[in-house]
Image (cartoon, helix red, strand yellow):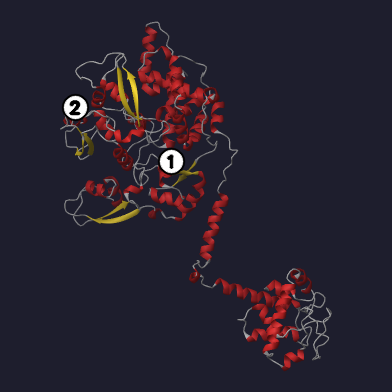
Amino acid sequence: MLINACASFDSSRGQLAPPSSVPSVSSNTTSNKSEPTPDIESKENTQVSEQISNTQESGIKQASTASKAKLQPSPEHTSTTPASNSDNEALTAPPYLISQIFDETVEPKEKFFVSGLLSSPDEDLFSSFALNNKLIDSASAEHNKQQNRNYEQYGFITPTDELEQKVNQELQLLRDRPSHNPDQGDLLDDIRKHFTLDLTLDNKRIQSQLRWYVNNPNYLDRTFKRSSRYLHHVVQEVKKRKLPMELALLPFVESAYDPFAYSHGRASGLWQFIPGTGKIYGLHQNWWYDGRRDVLASTQGALEYLSYLSRRFDGNWLHALASYNSGSGRVSKAIKRNKKLGKPQDFWSLKLPRETRAYVPKLLALAKIVKSPEKYNIQFPKIADKPYFETVQTGGQIDLAQAATLAGIDIKEIYKLNPGFNQWASAPMGPHRLLVPIESAKQFKAALTELPPEKRLNWTRYSIKRGDSLIRIAKKFNTTPTLIKQVNQLRSNTIREKQKLLIPVASEGKAYYNLSQHNRLKRKQDKISGSQGSKKLRYKVRSGDTMWDISRAHKVGVRSLAKWNGMAPTDPIKPGQELIIWSLKDVGKASMPLPSFRDKRQMIRKIGYRVRKGDSLARIASKFSVTINDLVSWNKLNKKKYLQPGQKLTIYVDITAT
């Protein structure tokens, strides 16, 4: 409206230019007649509307010129006759015409003032600047009126300053977020450039592993995609220490780059540290946290350990890698034995466990394929050569569900980047940091700064009841007695009835923290079923129980019992601990003709196995993660008879468990 109003000024006189069809009205008419007749008003309203519409295109230019000239009195000021159609004759508009340029809600007093601007006989009293200012003030008033209107009755949100600020912040975050660059370099190209081990080595053991990888391209595709979160960090750490780049591929051999991997030997994490070695390298384990699964800490520990092994074996990386798998003491003994017998002491000549003899060839075979994928007709998924995550210091314990909300990501992503945290929150004793996707780091930092430390956990007040203990209360609220004591500044485990305790609690239900230790085990147990005819039991461990005693009592293997409960056979058990058992206590020997997981046929593969020298039912069952009873059932074997080398066995293998 403001532009249209300004557009109707005559550029030469500083007055409103008349349209060809609108008659001029003198100031005498204005003064003698305060209100026009309805017919004249209707006609003139229509004419002014046409005037505004016709001059819209040239309005800005004319308004600019008009603002430089003073208002001139009309030559026909004293005349009562209509003005001619000449462009040189100005229109002195009555107040009701000017008021329509603004809004019908303009007060009469304001209308009279506008009229005075155009009809005053004192030509020096008002300038075009005064008119411009009046037009701007009126437009501003109309704008404020529009802002204050409530649009909720129309189904829209009424805009507010706070809402506008939030929208602008979100838009700024989107602008700051780095866009995906399709030309981003491939991390595998960088890895290939820094290989230093002798990849020209070729023998039967390497060829055997090469064939397996080439025949399982889906496995390579799956594991390399999984590694995309962590591989860039590992590569940078290897470069920093100037170690062979082949070491960045070692987690593929150890854990298939799965930070939640757990082996029968109690090894855990990307680098498969056992508890003892982990503690030596600062990878502490408790109810809240397992440093062996921590991406940053375990990578640092593994590379330090490998560097030490390399120095111990005078830079012989094959000996160092063999030691990482089976222990430096065992490799040293094998070297001494060969030296005493006058035999070569290279890795290929040492007498080592079967797993270790295949371990080094696996790594070399994988490095060969990564170096020349086209030679083996393998296509790897592209992994961007840029950091995937950023480390953000939290300064204290934080609920992981709350952290995911602050970062704007799914809680699964929080757990996959921070697999060292076992429970619903980060560890109270640290590390006080979280890894978040690099594109979410800025948002997370900003949100974390605005959230006070005392609000990063939810708290509840609990009144102690008769019979309560710290252990019972901690179990009830999914926390630890130590943390309850620390928060409430208790010097001992003694508590009194009706005493009040402040206890940290999860902001969401247990099921929400889907990759916590509890939920990972529960999901795994839900997928497992026992042999046909077995009965699922929940057994509470009693004082004096052992894994061996429990497995014997229920006629199951120790390894099977451990597997059902996400444990290693040598893991300790504690009184009060609950175990899942698929008991065969009351089942006859002839009741298991089919594989125990028949209902999961899509995940089961039937394979043929030829018995080798030194094999036993226990060894074969352990190798393929099945039970001895399953092997006997599937092959109609007699347990009292020995297996013979060359004998063929049928085995149903769950590929999700290998």
420 above or below 336? below
450 above or below 515? below
| Location of residue 65 in the rendering, given as x and y in whole percent from the top left corner | 79, 71
Q: Residue at x 46, y 49 (%)?
A: 407
Q: Earlier in the sequence, mark 1 or mark 2?
A: 1
Q: Nearer the viewer, residue 89 or 159?
A: 89
| Location of residue 16 in the rendering, given as x and y in whole percent from the top left corner | 76, 79
From the viewer's perspective, tell me whether residue 218 is left or right of residue 541: right
Q: Which residue is mark 2?
A: 590
Q: Residue at x 70, y 71 (%)?
A: 3
The extreme left residue here reads 586
Q: Which image quadrant: the N terminus?
A: bottom right
Q: In whole angstroms, how far apart are the C-alphas of marks 1 and 2?
A: 47 Å
Amino acid on which the number 1 mark rests in the picture: Leu
Q: Which mark is residue 268?
A: none
Q: Nearer the viewer, residue 95 or 40?
A: 40
Label 1: which secondary element: helix
443 above or below 355? below
| Location of residue 203 in the rendering, given as x and y in whole percent from the top left corner | 46, 14
Q: Nearer the viewer, residue 144 or 85?
A: 85
Q: Residue at x 57, y 72 (%)?
A: 146
From the viewer's perspective, tell me whether residue 579 is left or right of residue 111: left
Which tag is nearer the camera, tag 1 or tag 2? 2
Amino acid on which the number 2 mark rests in the picture: Ala
| Location of residue 521 in the rendering, given as x and y in whole percent from the top left corner | 31, 39
Q: Which residue is mark 1?
A: 417
From the viewer's perspective, tell me whether residue 477 is left or right of residue 426: left
Q: Which image quadrant: the C terminus?
A: top left
The extreme bottom residue here reads 32
Q: State which quadrant residue 336 falls in.
A: top left
Local crowd size for mark 1, using a 10 Å CA cut-off: few (<14), some (14–19), many (≥20): many
